[in-house]
Image: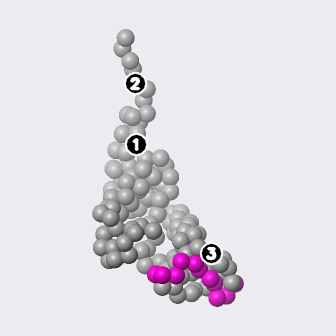
Amino acid sequence: MLSKNSKMLNRSTSDVSWYEFGRQLEYKSIWNSKYFCKVDQYFPSTQICSKCNSKAHLSLKDRMYLCPNCKIHLDRDYNASLNLHKEGIRILSELLNKKINTSKSCTAAAAGINACGLGSIESRLKQEKRKFQQPSMVVA
């Protein structure tokens, strides 16, 4: 649970900057040549069955997901994580199949950056990474 106080649901979650977290995650993904994609915040990950894709509406107090169709019984958050994983893979495969990435870049995050005309960011990141990975010389 993000906060022990349920009244905090409408406020910022314990002053955590989720935007900054996502920005850093995207930056580190590009840095390490990993895939990164954002799933829409309105994607109903907690209400879809991760096994059969049927929908069951849950309230915030419901902590277990019971599928009305296939009768699978999972923790709500675990079910949501499986759905988010599947949706992320679907989005990435669409991006890669549409050949959005027309440059030498190898990550979907960088493809989005290049699509926005910000390809120079990736080259700067690669230069920074090379600078930090070079062995430092110790003078005795």
Query: Could you tell me which quadrant the C terminus lies in?
Result: top left
| Quarter-of-image position of residue 72 | bottom right
Tell me which segment is drawn in magenta: 60-70
Tell which residue pokes out farthest to the front in this image: 4
CB under 8 Å between discs 2 and 3: no
Report the residue marked by disc 1: 126
Is 84 in front, or is 89?
A: 84
Q: Residue at x 52, y 81 (%)?
A: 62
Tell which residue pokes out farthest to the right in this image: 70
Residue 90, which numbered label?
A: none
Quick check: 59 left or right of 50? left
Check residue 100 for magenta coloring: no
Residue 136, which numbered label?
A: 2
Residue kind at label 1, given as amino acid type: Lys
Q: CA distance from mark 2 to mark 1?
A: 18 Å
Mark 1 / mark 3, whichever is N-terminal? 3
| Quarter-of-image position of residue 22 | bottom left
| Quarter-of-image position of residue 123 | top left
Residue kind at label 2, given as amino acid type: Ser
Crowding at dot 3, Cα within 10 Å, few <14 / some 14-19 / many 20+, comes out as some
Q: Residue at x 30, y 63 (%)?
A: 15
Q: Residue at x 52, y 67 (%)?
A: 88
Vertical relation: 127 (above or below) 5: above
